Amino acid sequence: MSARLRWRKFVSNFMLTLTGVCAAVSVSVLFFVLGYLVYNGGTSINWDFFTKLPVPVGEVGGGMANAIVGSAKLLLLASLFGVPIGFFGGIYMAEFSNSTVAFVVRYAADLLNGVPSIVIGIFAYAVAVLPFKHFSTLAGAFALGLMMIPITLRSTEEFLHGVPRALREASMALGASKWKTIAAVVVPAAYRGIMTAILLALARVAGETAPLLFTALGNQYWSPGLRQPTASLPAMIYAYALSPYDDWHRQAWAAGLVLLALILIVNIFARAILSRGGTVLR
Amino acid sequence: MSNAGPSTGSRSFLSRLWDGDEIARIVTFLFAATVVLITVLLVLQLWHDSSLPRHKFGLSFFVTRVWDPIAEQFGALPFIYGTLFTAAVALLLAVPLGLGSAIFLAELAPQKISDTLQFFIDLLAAVPSVIYGLLGMFVVVPVMRVYIQPALKHSLGFLPLFQGPAFGVGFLTAGIVLAIMVIPYIISVSREVLLSVPRDQREAALALGATRWESTWKVVVPFARTGIMGSIFLALARALGETMAVTMVIGNTPTISASLFSPGYSIAAVIANELTEATGEVYFQSLVELGLVLFLVTFILNGLARLMMVLTTQKGSGMGQV
Amino acid sequence: MKRLTGMLLVVLALGGFVLAQNALLINGAGATFPTPIYSKWFDTYHKANANIQINYQSVGSGAGIKQATDGTVDFGASDGPMNDEQLKAYSDKHGFALLHFPTVLGAVVPTYNIAGVSASLNFTPEVLAGIFLGRITKWNDPAIAGANKGVNLPAEDIVVVHRSDGSGTTYVFTDYLAKVSADWKDKVGKGTSVNWPVGLGGKGNEGVTGLVKQTPNSLGYVELIYAVKNNVSYGAVKNASGIFLKADLAGVSEAAAGAAREMPDDFRVSITNAPGKKAYPISSFTWLLIPAKFSDTAKRDALKSFLKWALTDGQKDAEELSYAKLPKEVVAKELKAINSIQ
């Protein structure tokens, strides 16, 4: 073996090991994030956190009950707004449209998907807050829903496309009309994939803070109905983190842990279903 | 997918209207059209609500350094600089790390390990920005201020890049946090692209006597070059639009400085901090104009990224040849 | 599992709908300067009047002014009084005026975090202006050392911290600097949001305090209570009579004495650098910005009764939180002015 070959082999092994190190470093970041949150937030999570409202500034104690409920409300409303648009739009794309319309819609959806969340916030502020003279849960849900539309649309289209032609043709052969075929055969076949995509979209917008700064504002109390400002987990984390109060920092870590745990659980669950390709055990 | 069903041209309008299929088509079309409508509305709103500064400042908006709400002088330069500078730092850190990881996952790791690790990387992409901000503020900033920045200053302080007091917050810290946030995108896209490179490319190189690394670095990666570029553009677009994590660690000062230690500002951060308090139409609309700029830049980058992905898949499917 | 999560979301959301349906929710936003006392007031008032909830978001005076002007909140709060232009913009937009009601008096203090220095530093107006202009860059600068003999000041760079958001506290501080430094007035001026020559930006009084606390060798300016409650050192400032005073209730009240006697009808007044041996130079009123007309009578009445309470019983809480009570003459004038809210 010549020296040159030995050198090349050495370089090869060295570089390949280096890539392994890169991968290890990248993955370990995740565990570091999780670990740190568990360490700092885990000790701060108590029953109060989930059930009490925030206490006056500077005082110790209280919780984020209104933020948790606020986030739940926002997400529910956001899905009610964003999912139908994405879902039915996706059905149109997969089943009815011609290629020009499909191109335009897909282009618009991709454009919307790429808009930075802060710009979505500007749009929502101009359209859903200023004209109504109100910060509100609705405005916040509008902003979040906007962000869910493209993901839902593309996933619905993709999963519907993935349903085999044979299934459709069999249904048609049995005399079902097109829309019945879609409703009773195609969509149920793609159901699992679409649901998991919606869950992933939900998980994504659950952590969004920037758009909420301009739409839902914040609230120390429960937010009644839909047209009042509301607290939310990400916005509280942000506000508490910036404060000088140690107790608020503690609560911010706890909230961060809760938020991240929920998001990761949804993600793990959704991806596990997608990759398995079998039926879900109930 | 063709439009199955009887050709609609041969029936009367009324009977077509009654047809469940036609209704379904129209209804779903309306939903799809809504998507286009919303997108158009968004662009229009950004354009319309930035008209004052566009007329008042014109192109000088992009080269003015001053951001003075009292004098109503608004210039975008510090924010554009900060956005680009932090994104550059982020990419400089994330691309080698990300590409290296992707190579490992695609070329070296056994299938199962590769899939498992990719799974974890995908989870990393799901962590919200505000949580990265939290960690940035309480973990990265102190470490930077106490250990890393002084060490850099000590060893490399003669470079203008590493001068100035060590605040902990600043361009470098923001760049590091951004790097962590965009690595997953580089890894997952690059890995996919690398995996799609046809086997015969590798085997040909190996057959000619290349080492594994040489085959990877000199044959496979160049083959996937376009897709990898696409992943970088994607990562860049994400880095430019990041708001929360950046505003928590960048220092929030409109400064243009060559030093990595200097505090700065980004477009997204200034919008987040000042939109709800911008008194006066020019002030408010200048912020909207910044939003418009950000939108346009990310739009172009995302478009380029997609273009590159398309080009790669065409290539991989055997069109271009050695 | 999916169904469970879905159900949980729905239950939580519905819970949010159902709860507190009967309470009247009033939304306000603005200054971080008085947030500690407002927070306490709104909580106490709510405990005494269970059906009235006043939600106050501490987002800075700039946001308070803008949101009040846009009408997206029911009332605003600011320690930088609105200027004539802003007031005109409001009345042009709504057809009626936006009224200023002073609630408490507070002080802006220079806070710092220097390792090894626990003494209270003395700051002259020239030093403060010089530091924030970026001319004085090190702690052991002769100008600082000269006023602080005997203190071991390190040869470190001063990390200047200011507000990144539109702030009444900034207004008060820059108003003071503009009065004591012609250079400052010329180069920067006064306002809720200025073009800072140097420094890091923190969001709200909270953010600045947080930054100062975490950053060695830093200097910022915050409302007194933030420095006190968070155990951050703050220094004495030389007043117009040449005496170094650390902010306290007596000093602030003294600064307001002259204004109390000659309070203008719209209550907008600046009391920085006030004459008087015992006057603390960086003092200020802080105002609630309340529309002169309400279309919602329930909200109007609730706010009016809250305001009356805050100006009388509420003042008791002020001193505990390091705010000075309003002078009696001012309160009397305000109580009369409240009647003009329709």
Image (cartoon, coloured by chain):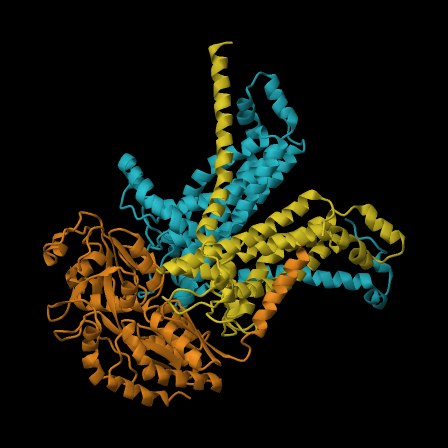
Q: Nearer the viewer, residue C274 or B320?
A: C274
**Residue B241 appearing in the image:** yes
Residue C76 horizontal/vertical position (percent): 39, 75
Q: How many dots with numbers?
A: 0
Q: Residue furthest top?
A: A1
Q: Nearer the viewer, residue C7 or C187?
A: C7
**What's the colour of chain C in the image?**
orange
> B106 left or right of B92?
right
- Image quarter for residue B61? bottom left
Q: Residue at the location (25% across, 78% down)? A: C269
**Residue C285 appearing in the image:** no
Q: Residue at the location (25% across, 67% down)? A: C108
Residue B34 horizontal/vertical position (percent): 64, 62
**What's the colour of chain B in the image?**
cyan
**What's the colour of chain A in the image?**
yellow
- Image quarter for residue B305? top right
Residue A157 horizontal/vertical position (percent): 70, 51
> B230 left or right of A245?
right
Compared to B308, does C168 lie above or below? below
Q: Residue at the location (34% across, 62% down)? A: C206
Q: Nearer the viewer, residue B312 or A230?
A: A230
> B159 left or right of B135?
left
Residue B293 horizontal/vertical position (percent): 46, 55
